[in-house]
Image (cartoon, grey):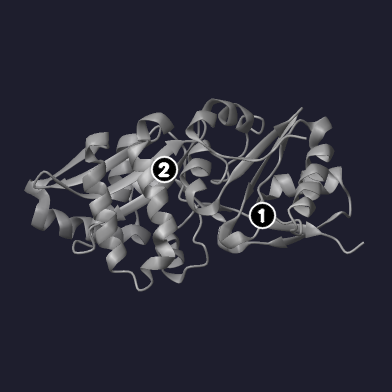
Amino acid sequence: MGSFEPVSLGDKDRITSLLRMFPHNEASEYTFTNLFIWEGTDKIEWMEEDGFALFRTWPQGTLHYLIAYAEADRLHAALETAITTAAQAGQPFSMHSIPEWYRDMMMECMPNRFRFEREARLDDYIYHSTDLISLAGKKYQSKRNHINRFMNVYGRRYAYAPYALHMADDCMMIYDHWLQTHQEPEALHGERESVRRALYHADVLDVVGGVILVDDKPEAFSIGERLNEEMAIIHIEKANLKIPELFSLINRDFAANAFSDLKWINREEDMGDEGLWKAKQSYHPARMIEKYHATITDD
């Protein structure tokens, strides 16, 4: 049996090829970018056996597996290996962030072996890209008002630019200023590391980004990537809180400049945070990707 190793940049090509095993997947957790940028916080590890690969995390020292990537005839072996290696680590088996289609595969492969519970805080919010770009109709009136207010004050001083590595320091300053306003900044130190990795390794990760400039100075940025031919994922979005209208503007401009040819935009989960829930609901998602948590049944 192989051993688990931390996800590193050197693993990008191999892990990316493994993730293509499920080309219909739309869940935000399952991109190399997401695995790498959160490795520093959640201790994301992986191992590969003949015909399958396992990914697991250790947030706050508790073990959780992500879905096993396996060919159909190796899924049983992959799940059994996950159960065995959890026991070897002295941890109960726990698998998080399971999309509904994968839950069904597990139930068919190993009937009555797992107990599944909904994990609504990890559901992904999916939007029509045309909605985020056009902001048309009454339901987006407040977003258009935000942008109009910004343009009335900053219109002649504003520009949109694709993200480039030379902007990394300025974008980290935007994040750090945002972090200072948070009531519990220590809880976000892990997020800070994920933002740093995304910004400073953007060229290797193949992510794209957008930046709002005011007086030639970066004041908002967003980082995302193309998941497939129809969907993009937005990993990061931050702005100068002294100009609150920037959030509506970077959301629209990034979608329009980077992903206008795609049908869907995945803006990830709300993690059970009320503020994030309100913000994501305010853009009226077209649908949600439901997630589940699996444990072993008592029998």
Disc assigned to residue 176:
none
Residue depicted at 85% across the width and 43% down the height: 109
Q: In this rendering, is residue 70 above or below 192? A: above
Placement of the C terminus among the 4 image quadrants: bottom right
Residue found farthest to the right:
299
Relative to 70, 286 lies left or right: left
Q: Which of 154 and 46 is in front in this view?
A: 46
Residue type beneath disc 1 = His
Q: Where is residue 149, by image quadrant?
A: bottom left
- How far across and down, in percent of the image, does residue 70 sit? 74, 34
Placement of the N terminus among the 4 image quadrants: top right
Q: Where is residue 275, by image quadrant?
A: bottom left
- Residue at the spot of label 2: 129
Relative to 286, 81 lies left or right: right
Of circles 1 and 2, the one toward us is 1
- How far across and down, in percent of the image, does residue 186 sit? 40, 67
Relative to 65, 27 lies left or right: left
- How far across and down, in percent of the image, does residue 293 sit? 70, 58
Q: Do the residues labelled 1 and 2 touch (CB within 8 Å)?
A: no
Residue depicted at 76% across the width and 27% down the height: 50
- Residue at the spot of label 1: 64
* Mark 1 and mark 2: Cα distance apart in space: 32 Å
Relative to 65, 14 lies left or right: left
Q: Determine crowd level at label 2: few under 14, some 14-19, many 20+ residues with C-alpha closer than 10 A.
A: many
Q: In this rendering, is residue 65 above or below 78? A: below
Say which label, 1 or 2, has the lower sequence index: 1
- How far across and down, in percent of the image, does residue 295 sit? 77, 59
Residue depicted at 26% across the width and 42% down the height: 168
Visible in this render: residue 87?
A: yes
Residue type beneath disc 2 = Ser
* SS class, disc 2: helix
Q: In this rendering, is residue 219 above or below 30? A: below
